[in-house]
Image: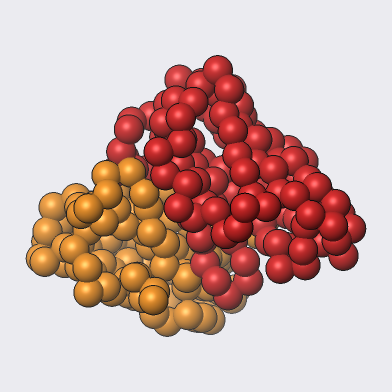
Amino acid sequence: GAGVSQSPSNKVTEKGKDVELRCDPISGHTALYWYRQSLGQGLEFLIYFQGNSAPDKSGLPSDRFSAERTGGSVSTLTIQRTQQEDSAVYLCASSQTKTGIGGYTFGSGTRLTVV
Amino acid sequence: TQLLEQSPQFLSIQEGENLTVYCNSSSVFSSLQWYRQEPGEGPVLLVTVVTGGEVKKLKRLTFQFGDARKDSSLHITAAQPGDTGLYLCAGVEGGSNYKLTFGKGTLLTVNP
């Protein structure tokens, strides 16, 4: 597609439920990133994919968080047993090159609210 | 530990004024980028600087990368209400060739 597409744009879930967030990167972009943006905290790195593999998962905050990428394209971020502190905007980005030097293209994000 | 410190955190000015936003670190970056984010949207890349001392201009915006590649500044001349937004600096650390580390941002409001 023309840009990075994320769905849903908003998600309200009850504490303890599982959620899936989807990211459809720009066609041909091999690198894909997930970040989390909380008020006053800036953008926090979660995970990096190169193709279908995830060489850097170091930012995932707990084992309740997981992500996968299939076909070198669409990625899904899953949060199990959601907690209130998981409330944030989850941003996906992709880049054309293997490095971040050329810049990322971000989606509009999924605003997750855990009640 | 916040790797990239941005200042000021908030800035409210009148249309037509000039302003400078700073991004500082004790780490060396192989490149540094500036993004602008509007409410409900993801950050949008404005510029990438790679060479120490580099200056880039984008209309009324001037970006500078420090000689030691540890800091950067964004200067806006004659600010307009359309410049309102969250300005984020982000750097690719020398030890990583893919991961961007972001500052917390400067929230700029330009009043008409």
The residue positioned farthest toward the front in the image shown: A63
- Choose between B65 and B77: the one closer to the eye: B65
Q: Is A71 situated above or below A84?
A: above
For residue B10, side relative to residue A63 (left or right): left
Q: Nearer the viewer, residue A37 or B72?
A: A37
Where does residue A114 sit, x and y in percent of width and height? 82, 61
What colouring method underlies this structural image?
Answer: by chain
Could you tell me if residue B19 is visible in this image?
A: no
Q: Which quadrant does the C terminus of chain A fall into?
A: bottom right
**Residue occupying image coordinates x 42% and y 82%:** B8
Rendering coords of residue A73 (x, y %): 55, 23
The answer to whether one can see residue A83 in this image is yes
Chain ID, red in image:
A
Can you tell which quarter of the image residue B24 is in?
bottom left
Counting from the top left corner in percent of width and height, residue A93 is at 51, 41
Instruction: Residue at 67%, 52% (x, y): give it.
Output: A64
Q: Residue at x 79, y 54 (%)?
A: A81
Q: How many marks?
A: 0
Question: What residue is shown at x 27% (from left), y 61% (from top)?
Answer: B63
> Residue A17's x, y, as percent?
85, 52
**Quadrant, the N terminus of chain A:** top right
Image-based side of B90 in relation to A115, left or right:
left
Q: Is residue B17 above or below residue B70?
A: below
Q: Which chain does orange denote in the image? A: B
Judging depth in this view, the residue of B68 and B38 nearest the camera is B68
